[in-house]
Image (cartoon, rainbow, N blue to C red):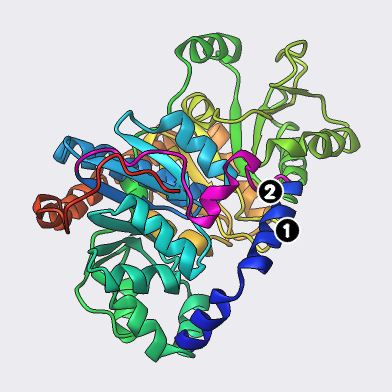
């Protein structure tokens, strides 16, 4: 199967170029940097030792930032190349990467493009996050004896079933990794069943993330505006959850007439759709992006249709429900640790399969509350909004859980230490530029 894949991708350049051009027209690729997707870079390779860290998209990129900061503290003499495959993740990296790290787009898995990428960058160590496996790249790393490590590794049930159909080929790819650091014991066991060796467990990197930032001036201004007002937050909502928020608000405000519901959609560009939902429910709302609209006593729902503001509203809201756990797309759940770190009481729906282990651990520790359905949501929300002691207890359990779990990064760095201290794989042509 790997031979067929290699043969097909070797003749796939015209098709891949057409796909890239189409993605450009759809706004999914950066036209100015399209050559990077073909292994060609305009950046010079910095002199000295280089670590390459690959994170597929935004979720992995956020975990990558945690690792990057730790790498530069432990090995400040090294440079870090970060690759991702989406424009959103590239924008995130542009804003948050430290000076010793820089971003490139990951090349598509064409053999020649892979070779061009590695010829140019010649990394001393490759770190991949989670479970994205590209055969040509992994086998070429193996052929060149470049040590590769899979960090924060996880395997969904769907991936396990799919990979078992080609277990022999998957084992060859997993042999490319000198070390696999899994998120959980079930993930470790799943990789071992597929033939992986040198698999360890450290926990999910999300536990070690720094608290989300916020603008101190905005925090001060909003705190003054909202002082004394009961409120709750629905964070990172998806389609179906804004309607739910409106229904919950109408129900709760019968007993709490001055209640403010704050909705932070995962995709702010859905603002018009969410406005329509509020209007259909006869709910007074305003948008954060509209400077002419301010929160008043008459505002019932505040729509945060801007990027990067979750850190602000987690600090303002004592109670939050994490989005995509009741959504119409089948759910999956977003990261609850970010809310727990900032002293929020955490609620979530039943569909949290993308981060199931984190949610299960939080629920078991009493650091989060699982809501069975909309009726249960009504009951719990109203009770917590009236019960200051119960709300404070849930906040404290969430914060304590997040604090106690924050040692994951330390465990990972201990496993990486021998590889960071190792001499370069071979001499580098410093300052090399890809033709």
Residue at which label 1 appears: 328
Vertical order, 402 against 158 (above or below): above
Vertical order, 109 against 43 (above or below): below
Residue at which label 2 appears: 238
Image-based side of 220 in relation to 199, left or right: right
Image-based side of 25 in relation to 208, left or right: right
Q: Earlier in the sequence, mark 2 or mark 1?
A: 2
- x, y percentage for residue 128? 35, 59
Image-based side of 407 in relation to 240, left or right: left
Tell which of 417 and 408 is nearer to you. Answer: 417
Q: Main secondary structure of the magenta part?
A: loop
In the rendered image, residue 81 lying in the magenta stretch gets the answer: no
In the rendered image, residue 27 lying in the magenta stretch gets the answer: yes
Q: Residue at x 14, y 56 (%)?
A: 419
Q: Residue at x 57, y 80 (%)?
A: 8
The magenta-colored residue range is 26-48
Visible residue check, residue 323: yes
What SS does tag 2 mark? loop
Tell which of 150 and 429 is nearer to you. Answer: 429
Q: Residue at x 60, y 42 (%)?
A: 236
Image-based side of 434 in relation to 47, left or right: right
Looking at this rendering, what residue extends furthest in the front direction? Answer: 435
The answer to whether the residues at label 2 and label 1 have Cβ atoms under 8 Å apart is: yes
């Amino acid at each position: 199967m790997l031979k067929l894949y290699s043969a097909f991708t070797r003749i796939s350049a015209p098709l891949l170029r057409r796909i890239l051009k189409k993605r450009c027209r759809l706004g999914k690729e950066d036209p100015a940097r399209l050559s990077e997707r073909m292994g060609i870079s305009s950046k010079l390779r910095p002199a000295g030792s280089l670590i390459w860290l690959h994170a597929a998209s935004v979720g992995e990129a956020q975990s990558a930032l945690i690792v990057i900061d730790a790498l530069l503290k432990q090995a400040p003499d090294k440079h870090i190349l970060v690759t991702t495959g989406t424009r959103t993740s590239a924008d995130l990296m542009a804003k948050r990467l430290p000076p010793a790290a820089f971003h490139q787009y990951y090349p598509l898995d064409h053999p020649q493009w892979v070779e061009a990428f590695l010829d140019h960058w010649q990394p001393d160590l490759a770190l991949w996050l989670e479970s994205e496996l590209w055969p040509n790249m992994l086998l070429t790393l193996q052929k060149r004896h470049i040590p590769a490590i899979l960090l924060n590794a996880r395997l969904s049930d769907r991936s396990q079933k799919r990979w078992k159909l080609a277990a022999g080929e998957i084992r060859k790819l997993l042999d490319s990794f000198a070390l696999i650091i899994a998120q959980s014991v079930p993930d470790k066991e799943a990789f071992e069943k597929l033939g992986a060796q040198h698999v360890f467990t450290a926990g999910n990197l999300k536990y070690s993330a720094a608290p989300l930032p916020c603008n101190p001036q905005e925090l001060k201004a909003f705190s003054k505006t909202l002082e004394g007002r009961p409120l709750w937050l629905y964070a990172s909502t998806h389609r179906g959850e804004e309607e739910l928020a409106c229904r919950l608000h109408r129900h709760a405000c019968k007993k709490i007439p001055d209640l403010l519901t704050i909705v932070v959609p995962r995709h702010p560009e859905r603002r018009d759709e969410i406005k329509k939902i509020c209007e259909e429910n006869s709910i007074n709302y305003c948008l954060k992006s509209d400077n002419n609209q301010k929160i008043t006593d008459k505002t019932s729902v505040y729509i945060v249709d801007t990027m990067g503001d979750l850190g602000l509203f987690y600090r303002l809201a004592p109670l939050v429900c994490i989005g995509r756990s009741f959504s119409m797309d089948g759910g999956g759940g977003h990261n609850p640790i970010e809310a727990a770190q900032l002293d929020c009481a955490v609620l979530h729906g039943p569909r949290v399969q993308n981060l199931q282990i984190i949610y299960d651990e939080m629920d078991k520790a009493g650091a989060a509350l699982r809501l069975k359905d909309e009726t249960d949501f009504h009951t719990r929300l109203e009770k917590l909004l009236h019960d200051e002691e119960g709300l404070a207890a849930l906040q404290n359990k969430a914060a304590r859980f997040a604090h106690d779990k924050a040692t994951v990064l330390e465990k990972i760095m201990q496993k990486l230490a021998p590889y960071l201290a190792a001499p370069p794989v071979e001499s580098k042509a410093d300052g090399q530029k890809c033709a």
